[in-house]
Image: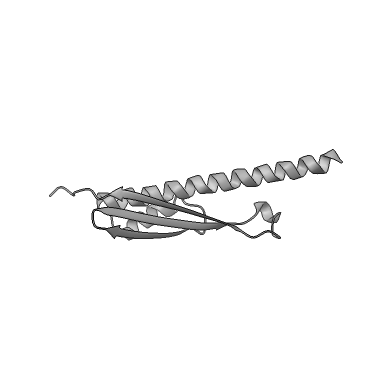
Amino acid sequence: MAVPLLLALTIGLVWLLTLGVAQVRLVDATREAARAVARGDTAAEAVARARQVAPAGTELSVSPTGDQVVVHGSVSVDGVGGLFDALPSVHLTAEAVAAAEEVPP
């Protein structure tokens, strides 16, 4: 009786670890895109660079507002290996803000 309980606990911990890693990657991707646009890169270049870091299926939006750049990212994470298909996907979001830098002439 203890083995199924330990197995369920292990799967649950792996699921939480997966969510944590996905959240960290999403935060890193939004931060990378915001810094790139603030340095003067185009939004398309910044999003392409951020997609290298972001989890698969991430949606990124860049909105420069005055002297700041705001990047919003979101992704839905499914269960580990299809084990949690009965449960809904977890929706993760992240937002990064960077001050626009002046580009030297």
Image check: 102 left or right of 36?
left
x and y percent of residue 100 in the render? Answer: 25, 50
The furthest residue to the left: 105
Along the viewing direction, whichever of 81 and 38 lies nearer the viewer: 38
x and y percent of residue 73 in the render? Answer: 44, 56
x and y percent of residue 25 in the render? Answer: 48, 47
Q: Quadrant of residue 42?
A: bottom left
Q: Which quarter of the image is occupied by the N terminus?
A: top right
Which residue is at a point 47% across and 51% down the rendered structure image? 54
Along the viewing direction, whichever of 18 and 45 lies nearer the viewer: 18
Colour convention: one colour
Which residue is at a point 27% across and 51% down the rendered structure image? 38
12 to 45, vertically: above or below: above
74 to 18, vertically: above or below: below
Along the viewing direction, whichever of 15 and 50 lies nearer the viewer: 15
Which residue is at a point 47% across and 50% down the rendered structure image? 26
86 to 52, vertically: above or below: below
**Image label count:** 0
x and y percent of residue 32 in the render? Answer: 37, 48
Image check: 12 left or right of 28?
right
The furthest residue to the right: 1
